[in-house]
Image (tube, rainbow, N blue to C red):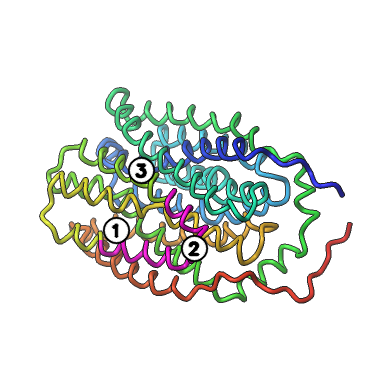
């Protein structure tokens, strides 16, 4: 079979970056809704946190199947479906009268939507359409776009809440999520069957190989920690700052700074991944996070200390994404990349579930986030050590099983 024509580098990067900018930018500001929603609805912080914890779990679980589907039929259909679910979920958040409905919409609908509009699906297109020599760099570009979305969207979301109220702000975001649909056309691979024809393994063979390979399991363990840290900070830091007497705009600026410096951090991580051992980049990132959190909770709290912490943690925020996904492609190839990335990301989302839920649970019972901060530090050190043991060498397949025509 003749190979399908490739999408242009510029087209893949532009459309992929814009999709991630919207999908990641919208979700990065969810912490701004914690206090307005809980105060008006009379809910506890644990109620809100549990819904977002379910969101992260649903995102990770659905991401496995979104990756399988994207590998089989192409990213376009998955992106369109994800955008429609995103809009429905955000509108549902605004209109939910009970904690159960809020969990179903903010948790399950939005979580499944994010599975179809974020990294696993976009990186599958990058892996298939961009050469290995530029793959890590391209992933860094796309992750940096997601970081720019965080920088750009958080102040926008803060202003929407201030100007329109939290319900109408969510309805505006629901409409913005639908912009992903026209962008998905730029990632429409000409024939997904052409991708499937190049496979040497079935889905079950690919999964058996990956889960029997120690480095894949180590990557999953490291990504668990990534999810725990970033989602706990992203959701609970605004309330942590308000609890310590900070003005509301300090939290908005802090989240925006995380996004701004993440643009730089993810691009650098992706670029360095072309020249340095990716496992060492990951080890540095996780150790850097642990040290940054330690200094933050021990130093006197002030707007300046918040902004400095946000800048440092921002540079380390999503910078794990390009090297982790590049290692997966380097070890296993790109035929099942979206699916394998989905499984690794599922581990990330289990960590996210625990980070966001434990934040609310322990706060309601202790009146403080201190225990969770210390857990995040310990996990960062452990993940740094775990990633140093990852092998990046391509796996050797002695007897590939060809697929029937």
Residue visible at 64% across and 34% down?
186
Find out whether the residues at labels 3 and 1 contact each other: C-beta distance under 8 Å: no
Residue farthest toward the right in the current orientation of the protein: 405
Disc on the earlier residue, 1 or 2: 2
- Distance of label 3 from label 1 (alpha carbons): 27 Å
Residue 113: image location, x then y, percent? 54, 43
Q: Position of residue 327 (x, y in %)?
A: 55, 63
Disc 3 is placed on an element classified as: helix
Foreground label between 1 and 2: 2
The residue located at (34%, 51%) in the rendering is 315
Residue linked to disc 3: 259
Image height check: is 31 above or below 333? Answer: above
Residue 4, labelled with which disc?
A: none
- The span shown in magenta is 267-291
Q: From the top left corner, tell me how far across and down residue 326 is, in percent.
A: 55, 58
Residue pointed to by mark 2? 347
* Quadrant position of the C terminus in the picture: bottom right
**Which secondary structure, mark 2?**
helix
Q: Magenta span: helix, strand or loop, mainly? A: helix
Q: Which residue is mark 1?
A: 361
């Amino acid at each position: 079979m003749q190979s399908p024509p490739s999408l242009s580098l510029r087209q893949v990067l532009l459309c992929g970056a814009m999709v991630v900018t919207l999908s990641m930018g919208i979700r990065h500001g969810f912490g701004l809704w914690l206090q307005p929603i809980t105060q008006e609805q009379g809910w506890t912080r644990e109620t809100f946190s549990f819904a977002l914890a379910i969101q992260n779990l649903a995102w990770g679980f659905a991401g496995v199947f979104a990756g399988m589907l994207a590998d089989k039929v192409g990213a376009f259909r998955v992106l369109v479906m994800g955008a429609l679910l995103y809009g429905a979920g955000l509108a549902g958040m605004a209109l939910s009268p009970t904690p159960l409905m809020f969990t179903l919409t903010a948790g399950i609908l939005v979580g499944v939507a994010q599975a179809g509009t974020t990294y696993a699906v976009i990186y599958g297109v990058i892996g298939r359409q961009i050469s290995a020599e530029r793959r890590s760099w391209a992933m860094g570009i796309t992750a940096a776009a997601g970081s720019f979305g965080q920088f750009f969207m958080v102040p926008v979301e803060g202003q929407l809440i201030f100007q329109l109220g939290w319900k109408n702000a969510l309805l505006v975001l629901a409409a913005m999520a639908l912009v992903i649909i026209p962008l998905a056309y730029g990632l429409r691979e000409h024939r997904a069957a052409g991708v499937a024809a190049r496979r040497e393994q079935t889905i079950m063979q690919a999964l058996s190989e990956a889960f029997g390979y120690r480095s894949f399991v180590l990557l999953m363990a490291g990504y668990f920690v990534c999810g725990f840290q970033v989602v706990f900070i992203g959701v609970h830091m605004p309330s942590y700052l308000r609890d310590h007497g900070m003005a509301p705009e300090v939290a908005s600026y802090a989240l925006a700074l995380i996004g701004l410096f993440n643009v730089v951090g993810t691009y650098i991580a992706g670029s360095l991944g072309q020249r340095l051992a990716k496992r060492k980049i990951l080890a540095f990132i996780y150790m850097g996070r642990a040290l940054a959190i330690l200094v933050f909770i021990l130093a006197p709290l002030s707007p300046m200390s918040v902004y400095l912490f946000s800048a440092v943690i921002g540079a380390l925020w999503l910078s794990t994404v390009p090297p982790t996904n590049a290692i997966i492609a380097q070890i296993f190839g790109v035929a099942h990349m979206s699916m394998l990335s989905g499984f690794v990301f599922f581990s990330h989302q289990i960590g996210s579930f625990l980070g966001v839920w434990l934040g609310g649970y322990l706060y309601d019972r202790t009146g403080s986030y201190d225990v969770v901060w210390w857990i995040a530090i310990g996990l960062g050190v452990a993940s740094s050590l775990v990633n140093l043991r990852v092998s990046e060498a391509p796996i050797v397949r002695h007897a590939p099983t060809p697929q029937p025509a």
